[in-house]
Amino acid sequence: MSSSNLQRKLIQIWAFVFKNWIMTKRNVFSLFEILFWPVVGFLSVGLLTNFLKLDPNMSGFILIGIISMSVTQVCQIDVAYVLLYDLWSKSMKHTFIAPVYPFQLIFGSWLIGVFRSFIVFLLLSILSRLAFGFDFLRPGIGPLGLFLLGLFLISALVGMTVCILVLLFGYKADVAAWSISSLMALICGIYYPISILPYPLPEIARAIPLTYFLEYFRTFYGFEGETKALLGWGFGLTAFYLMIEALLFKAVLYRARKNGVLIKLSE
Amino acid sequence: MVLAIKAEGIYKTFRSGWRGKRKKEVLKGIDLQIEQGEIFGILGPNGAGKTTLLSILSTLLLPDRGKVQILGIDGLRDGHRIRERVNISSGNANFLWSLTVQENLHFYGMLYGLAGKAREEKVRALISLFNLEEHRDVPFDRLSTGMKQRLSLAKSLLNDPEVLFLDEPTVGLDPSVSIWIRDQIRSIQKEKGMTVLLTTHNMREAEHLCNRIAFLKSGEILTAGTAETLKRMVRMGESVRIEFKGKISEEELLRTDGVINYSLMENLCEVIVDDGEKRLGPLIALFAQSGAQIKKVSLGQTDLEDVFIEFAKEIDSDMGLCV
């Protein structure tokens, strides 16, 4: 690939960072997404752990869960927004008549999602230290970085799922942007180990990479994981699902061009 | 002849309802050849399939059957390469609502890979070309319909497209804005030499802008050609209206060269002739010979709308239908 071609591809990716950034700036609800809901949720759960007089590690177990949940929700919504904004503005066809590849669309919006959710992470980890004495840096920068990378990649997966559903079902699919991550939180053990879930939910949880990333990070706070090579499972499954979703995205985009969804969603 | 657009046997059916049982056949074997640098109009009533055809040619929609070549590139296999060289503007334009005019243009400029300074200049030039300076910082959802349409056209020129698709570019606009937009399209096309494919149900717009026109009805192209050719094809010619006093011989009138048809009321005769200017003299002479006193003569051209109605009639009568 020539340097001008590479530059062109990078600019196209940057277009989606630009779009999501401007939309975020103009949308008062995005401030709620970054500040209000994560902070309110975090403080409520943190205060509950104080009331229940949980030991520091047990409190940590729960705080890791709520912070992970907030980070994932904020990051995935940005990926989902890349098509949701077009859906709500009825401008879908202008995006897809431009010479952009689906990966540029996802990658650009994911970058802004990573930025926004990292702010959420910083905010909540500082709060957890100040309000509840919980040290998020105890495992060290390396494990924390890997844990966050895992969360960001899972967010890309969830956001892509929403985009795929939008191309399949149009307006009926936007509810998925808020429900998939909540459903995942229920199954993957945000507040509890997955072993307490009724059958077959633990089996389903083992098929979701978030379960492994949570278990991995909790090992630094005295909780053993159910399997070894937690990171291997986490990243392995994530890579597998990313490949599947990339193929699915291509297929549903082809279908949308075939059945006229791109036009219908622009009218 | 270098073709910008070539379509062969394009069929498209939309399915809806449970398991796609409800079908609507929108295009029924469209063949089209458009030369580079041409402004080609697709005329037809609502629901004729104009937008569907344009969407297929612009790679937004895939046909069920048929071949599409844009600038020599296979539209079904290599849509991405085509998208780099074409662009679209639609009536009832929709863009990201909270982005301003300038931001929308920057966003779409980035989608076409335009880098910093080049993009800045391009956006500035397009804002100036479409008189959007005062609105550059206005969010899209606060623009008037005319301004939205100008933005849509500006966006469609960001990548200097070789083929520009315009889907009802003046729909819903008041006449003065429509005329301004048409003039802009005409002058930009002349300056850049791009191929323009335009859909419209406005006959005047087609006649004013297009080198060639195709009539589309119920998913089929009834005919195509220049406006003049089409008028000649249906032998609709031009009308000569003569106000007079006295009597004329209807037999003589019909025998006059170039007369296609006529209608006669008390003091008014409307004669349809193949060439108004050529037949005017003999007609006046005939009235004079008959002893009629001519009060007023006017020459009018047949409207393209009449031609379209005539074609639609012919097709429907071939199919045993009534218009």
Image (spheres, helix red, strand yellow):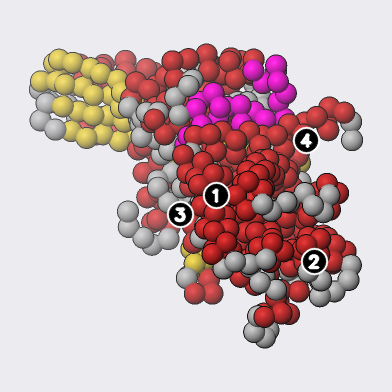
The answer to whether B72 is drawn above or below residue B23 in the figure is above
Q: Give percent across and percent down for residue B216.
A: 48, 46
**Disc 4: which residue:** A9
Chain under callout 2: A
User: Do discs 4 and 2 share a chain?
Assistant: yes
Residue A39 numbered tag:
1
Where disc 3 sits, the SS reads: loop
**Disc 3: which residue:** B218
| Residue type, numbered disc 2 | Gly
Chain under callout 4: A
**Disc 2: which residue:** A222
Bin the neighbour count of mark 3 within 10 Å (Cα to Cα): few under 14, some 14-19, many 20 and up. some
User: Do discs 1 and 4 share a chain?
Assistant: yes
Per the rendered image, the range of residues in magenta is B97-120
User: Do discs 1 and 3 share a chain?
Assistant: no
Residue pictured at 53% horizontal, 34% vertical: A25
